[in-house]
Amino acid sequence: MHFDVVTLFPEMILDSSGYGVTGKAIENKVVGLSVWNPRDYTQDKHRSVDDRPYGGGPGMVMKYQPLFDAVNAAQSNNKAADSKVVYLSPQGKQITQSLLLDISQSSQLILVAGRYEGVDERFIDSICDEEWSLGDYVISGGELAALVVIDAITRLIPGVLGDDDSAKQDSYMDGLLDYPHFTRPEQIGLSSVPKVLMNGNHCEIKQWRMQQALGRTELRRPDLLKNKELNAEQIALLEEFRNIN
Ligand code: 9D3
């Protein structure tokens, strides 16, 4: 996967992507990352990337031409067969794990980070394939969203996470919240580690963790359970959780 980020703040992307899983993946050349600054594609002497909105109102709008030429440069640089252009904005479709898993099969993802009030609508119409949002809250620009997308997709690329990585859990946990975790010391004030985790019975531990995952998902995110098919054992574990708690 090659990521291209079109942004007025390229350092924000480059400075943040060097850490952890994404940093390692870039180092190992499992993913590529390039940044493209619309300001470098301006043609006027003031290098203007924004202008006042037609119709009036507050704020500024990013101009069509510098954005379009920056995306074109990213496309020409790569010539990948399956390349997608995604504009990150509050008007977009909310990002989900399955959306990201889908797009992680592509060979090039061009992420456009907006600033100010957003971009000229004709830029979206002419060259963007999709419009994505992080969710229903306001942030100041698309760069943090681009970093979220890069991180989440990089983790999905085969070979990026080690086999023993905690993020690579059994698929039967998919779509559920995580079970609670404990490490030393065994006692903190009046609070002890659940006895079942101390007895070395791995079958019992596995069952308890599944039960906790199911119960917590029902309590905190019942919407997630509605889209999940539970097997007979899971239904029994959840029923027992309801009775205990
Ligand atoms: C306060 C300004 N808003 C007036 C209704 C519009 C607005 C414009 C630009 C709100 C946010 C932004 C900048 N946001 C993003 O670029 C963005 C974003 C977000 O704000 N929330 C969730 N996902 C995303 S992805 C990109």
Image (cartoon, rainbow, N blue to C red):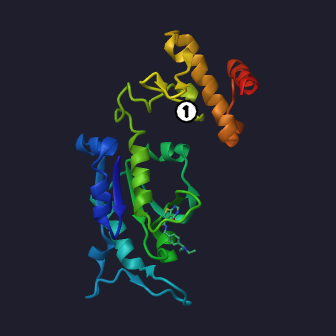
Note whether 222 is above or below 197 in the view shown.
Answer: below
Q: In the rendered image, which quarter is residue 152 located in? A: top left
Q: In the rendered image, which quarter is residue 15 located in? A: bottom left
The image shows residue 111 at horizontal and vertical percentages of 41, 60
The image shows residue 26 at horizontal and vertical percentages of 27, 45
Residue name at image x 35 percent, y 46 percent = 1
The quadrant of the picture occupied by the C terminus is top right
Residue name at image x 38 percent, y 43 percent = 154
Residue, far left: 27
Left or right: residue 161 compared with residue 228 = left
Residue name at image x 50 percent, y 86 percent = 53
Residue name at image x 56 percent, y 11 percent = 203
The image shows residue 136 at horizontal and vertical percentages of 59, 60
Q: Specify whether tag 1 is near ligand 1 (CB below 8 Å).
A: no
- Nearest the viewer among 204 and 8 is 204
Return the residue at label 1. Answer: 178
Left or right: residue 118 compared with residue 32 = right
Note whether 68 is above or below 200 in the view shown.
Answer: below
Left or right: residue 195 compared with residue 30 = right
Look at label 1 and name its amino acid. Answer: Asp
Q: Is residue 106 visible?
A: no
Left or right: residue 186 compared with residue 234 = left
- Nearest the viewer among 59 and 83 is 59
